[in-house]
Amino acid sequence: MLISRNIIQSRTDKIHSWLFLVPVFTVLLIAAFIPLGYGFVFSFMRYKLNLQQAPVFVGFKNYIDMFKDELFIKALKNNIFFAVLSVSIELVFGIIIAMMLSDDNLLSRLLITFLMVPLIIAPVASGTLWRMMLDRTYGIVNYLITLIGLKPVSWLGDYRIAIYTIILVDCWQFTPFVALLVLSSIKAIPKDIIEAARVDGANPFKVFTKIVLPITSPVIVIVAMIRFIDAFKVFDTIFVMTQGGPGSATEMLPTYIYRQGIKFLRVGYSSATAILFICSMSIIAWLFIRLRSSQLKRIE
Amino acid sequence: MAVYKTQIKSVKEDRIMGFFKPKMRSKSYLSNFLGFPTRVIVLILLFISILFPFYWLITNAFKVEQEYFASPPVVFPSKITFQNFIDAVKKYEMFKGLKNSLLIATGTTVLTLISGSMAAYALINGALPRKLKRVFGGWFLVQKMYPAVVVAVPVFYIIRTLGLLDNVLSLIIMNTSFNLPLVIILMIGFYQEVPYEVEEQSMLDGCNLFQRYFYITTPMVKPGLVATGMLTFVYSWNEFLYAVILTVNKAKPLTVTIAGFITDKGLIWGPMAAMGCAVVFPVLIIMWLMQRDFISGISAGALKG
């Protein structure tokens, strides 16, 4: 990606090119490097912003406390459940939709345009939308359910159902993302391969499993990785729809860190959670990258 | 002659939806892989499930109070009222939210485009050690990975120390840092498309790096700059996490205002829907203007990093 051009450069050019990086570094310094450093240091301290008290070094106590906290374990479990389920649903539907929209008629193109809509509106807005539609008494979804003859469901108030509701909204918003990316890689498949399979008498489903899936699998893996990592960033939707409730039924890691750090002002503890979070995310990403490179090798 | 005509046709189609070039007729064979009836059903459901929520939002914004609390729900409102918008503006400070959102998104876009395009240009055409480029690549990956919330507490602490709490500026800085990787990746792509000869020639004419950046190369990538800017604008318009952490009252953008509705004001659906329209529609208009660039922008941002 970053291939440099071999231009013979003068000295002013050298100075200029360093100067060109100054604005970026300034912003990153304020918004990323210093906070990360602070977070790392705070994670070994007991420090509460609301008390007039200097931070005290406590070693790994924050990290140990974390695993004693039931709410943290609950948030972790919820988050993993949420990530696995929503990403798999999104992948299945995304791939199906991408396949179905892979022809070039006008209708498909129109639908592709519509697919972008959930993707780019604010998660807060989509949370609001669904909150209105899923309301227990006045929501239209419950009305439709009673039409079929079922009892109205308390979508966000029932601790057993709330997490599935969040998953539903997440899928509504991000299945298009999977679909669009897979679609562009399906379109890039050379025409002759599919034609040849067709001449040989393969039915479309077979072409899908034997040709399209293997060829698009690198893209699918990347998309899965992006979505999986993003699923651990989910905050807006939960904040708007359930606030982590009822009880702690939809508490996830970002909302947990937010609550501990910003609401209870436990700086040290929430920093420790955050640092652990970054580490585990890097491990997951590293695994995915390994998976992808081994896949690329196999194709070669 | 016939060939010529089809060529014209395909050029036209290209113009309509340039990103997906029409390639083959036999594709419909693939798209019916689960059978034609399943396809029709799935696509109709997809269509409804995407558009109906928006229809619901718009109609709710214009319904009178009895109708949005009616059971069975009113799908086609019998009376249209602007009261909800008036309430949203008067009671719930919609204009303040709009102004802040606009300030934040515009500020972020300008700052990100300037700093991002400079960095991208220096990385492509500048005289920088190769290692630095790899460092940058690695940093993009890291930043894409870590959730924004992990630096929330330290950022809150730093911004509080700087006295920038409840100030639009702090949000602009934060949003800029989130959008920089995407902007740099996209701008690198655009700068690479400029022929090498242009750089060489202008260098022979005695332009230094800054002059080449400012007068020659950047004007050539203006369309790319605009598309990237739109994408940044949308992302920072939609940003919520830091908006809710770093603002109290004065600098609240729309996303926070609307979230406030849901958490503590109960069921004031009319103004809430009106506010929702205000959050969603600017973005939809931008998307409509830029549709093909959006797809390529989103996928490039996702796949290249």
Image: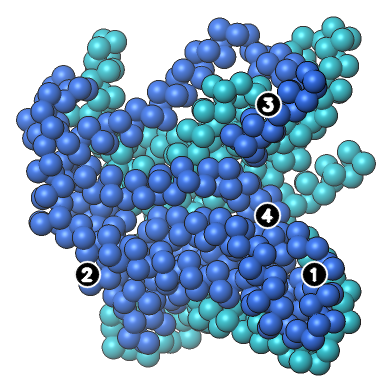
- Mark number for residue A285? 4
Work out how far the residue at label 4 is from the one at label 1, CA to CA, in angstroms.
39 Å
Task: Report in which chain the residue with disc 4 lies.
Answer: A
Chain in blue on the image: B
Identify which amino acid the numbered label 2 is placed on.
Asn
Q: Of the numbered discs in the image, which one, if any, rests on residue B198?
A: 1
Q: Amino acid at mark 4?
A: Ala
Give the side of residue B51 with respect to residue B59, left or right. right
Answer yes or no: is residue A54 visible.
Answer: yes
State how far apart marks 1 and 3 are (Cα): 34 Å
Question: Is disc 1 surrounded by few (<14), some (14 to 19) or many (20+) residues within 10 Å?
Answer: few
Dot 4: within a 10 Å radius of its alpha carbon, few (fewer than 14), some, or many (20 or more) residues? Answer: many
- The secondary element bearing badge 1 is classed as helix
Give neighbour class at mark 2: few <14, some 14-19, many 20+ (Cα, 10 Å). few
- The numbered mark at residue A1 is none
The answer to whether residue A83 is seen in the rendering is: no
Residue B142: quadrant of the picture: bottom right
